[in-house]
Image (tube, helix red, strand yellow):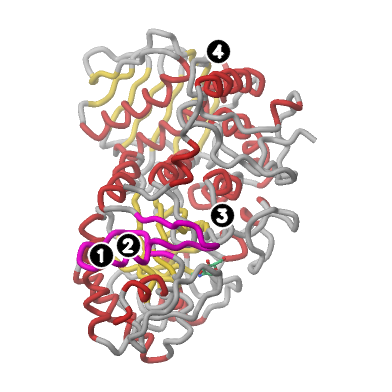
Amino acid sequence: MSRTPRTGVARAVTPAAGALARSATQAAGRLLTPPTIGLGDVVPAPASVRPRPAADFVLAADAAIRVSADADARAVADHLAELLRPATGYPLPVADLPPAPGPLQLTLSAAAPHGPVATVSGDAEGYRLDIDPDTVRITAGTATGLFHGVQTLRQLLPAAVESRTPVAQHWVVPGGSIVDRPRFPYRGAMLDVARHFFGVEDVCRVIDHLARYKLNHLHLHLTDDQGWRIAVDSWPRLATVGGRTAVGGGPGGWYTAADYRRIVGHAARRHVTVVPEVDLPGHTNAALVAYPELAPDGVAPPPYTGTEVGFSYVDPTNERTYDFVADVLGELAALTPGPWLHIGGDEAYKVKGAAYTGFVERAQRIVAGLGRTVVGWHQIAPAGQVDGRVLQWWGTDGDDPAVAEAVRRGARVILSPGNHAYLDMKYAPDTPIGHDWAGLIDVHRAYHWDPATHLTGVPAEAVLGVEAPLWTESVTSLAEIEFLLFPRLPALAELAWSAPSTRSWAGLRARLAGHGPRWHAAGITFHPSPEIPWPAGPADQALTPAADPHRGPVPHQPAPGRDHTAPDTR
Ligand code: TNX
């Protein structure tokens, strides 16, 4: 059971409100639909786009989806059907290929994707999309590639496809071919569920947002001073005591094993891997409240609901601490199918020198012993190398000799530069929530850096990818999460997916503009950044996000004066 009083309240929707939301969504879908969608209007920008203007495809009411006879591919076909059914109202039955080919085809092929950019071998995530008047065909070597192809197809349909209720619409897909594959294998976002807790439904919706933009990792920051968010059977008070607090004194909450499995399962069906983080040895006040024996003085500290960092730590000289680390990571590993375990390691200001590196090295060995790959914030760089270890760099100055040295010893790097990728930074001085310690990050700033060359002494081969962290000291609702994610998350996703030769700021601005109506139709709150030329529309349709009738109203309606709105047409 998730402790999510907020989302519980938001679901109480009256029939009248539901009807209103439905008609508002339909109206917005009709009015905001851009007149035409080009084959290249995709975010992230595909590797190769070849339009064939006379070859548009129109989805018919009796269309069927045909898929290679493979369980994972079939799941992708079912996902496509589920995406298209609500707005089209079409039945879209799914069946195996062959015998009947059908107008929508998802084909697994060892040779795919083939085409001008498919010369790189081992590309497990690439796909090919061919659209002609009779067929839409997605071909890929893996179900993951098919899934990414489906997300591209979704973006090529009119924005009203995002409606959760039927819309009268000509469902046209522009003709031509796309061949696509990612630049970096690790493309992610982080959600801090420790400073404020977000329930399973909210996390699943964030996963959906990642999947739209071909991000394939969700890092969950599960523990911090203000709250412990995952049940641990062998140390039960971590959740039942340590989970009861949050920044600002709210009720907190935690995930049971079943909750966490639901998140992991939802992510897996969207080809997203969950990366759980237990932040150690600092950021542990909530754990110490639950188990004072781990504290250096053995005394329980008061619960913490402020936003300072760096004051708490588990005792690195106490063997019991390592029992705790091994038990917690062991249970988490058992619940987590993905290869990564994140041990934090940031801002442990009171554990210095050899005490710190010694602690990290033991934690790294525990992770290795569980058969997993360790990830840590870049502060762990001075600790000894273990096979495959990954440093998540969150600095703001690309000269970091300790990280460069760790890379020379074999570490790989995930880039989360604080001044480009931190989604908790404000867009502008008047952004109502967020921080500014790493600067203001508008869409241009989020987009203007190159992961392959950003860190001195860290070659492109050592860069696993990009992750955009969202810390939630100032974030209390799903609408606020979305406001900080959109439109920056799609911009960062493009940096991680698209080759530099295929993308540009001018192109991104134009393509993001076309996504505003999609977000509106999907009920996604976003920041109407003045950098983006959002399509014009009647003023009243631009002011509130369309509520999704199946979710209830948008959980947090913006307070007066707050700028949590759908596209601004000024
Ligand atoms: C730094 S980035 C932190 C977090 C804060 C964040 C706020 C990192 C590894 N540590 O504890 O939430 O700044 O922006």
Distance between the alpha carbons at the discs numbered 3 and 4: 37 Å
Residue type, numbered disc 3: Val
The reply to whether the C-beta atoms of the residues labelled 4 and 2 are less than 8 Å apart is no
Residue 232 highlighted magenta (yes or no):
yes
Q: Nearer the viewer, mark 3 or mark 4?
A: 3
Determine the residue positioned at 58% across, 48% down.
480
- Identify the residue position indicated by label 4 in the image: 169
**Disc nearer the start of the sequence (4/2):** 4
Determine whether, in the image, residue 153 is placed left or right of residue 113.
Answer: right
Q: Which residues lie in the magenta part?
A: 227-254
- Identify the residue position indicated by label 3 in the image: 475
The reply to whether the C-beta atoms of the residues labelled 2 and 3 are less than 8 Å apart is no
Residue type, numbered disc 2: Ala
Distance between the alpha carbons at the discs numbered 1 and 2: 6 Å
Front-lying residue, 255 or 144: 255
**Disc nearer the start of the sequence (2/3):** 2
Front-lying residue, 292 or 281: 292
- Identify the residue position indicated by label 2 in the image: 239
The reply to whether the C-beta atoms of the residues labelled 1 and 2 are less than 8 Å apart is yes
The reply to whether the C-beta atoms of the residues labelled 3 and 1 are less than 8 Å apart is no
**Disc nearer the start of the sequence (3/1):** 1
**Disc nearer the start of the sequence (1/4):** 4
The C terminus appears in which quarter of the rendering?
top right
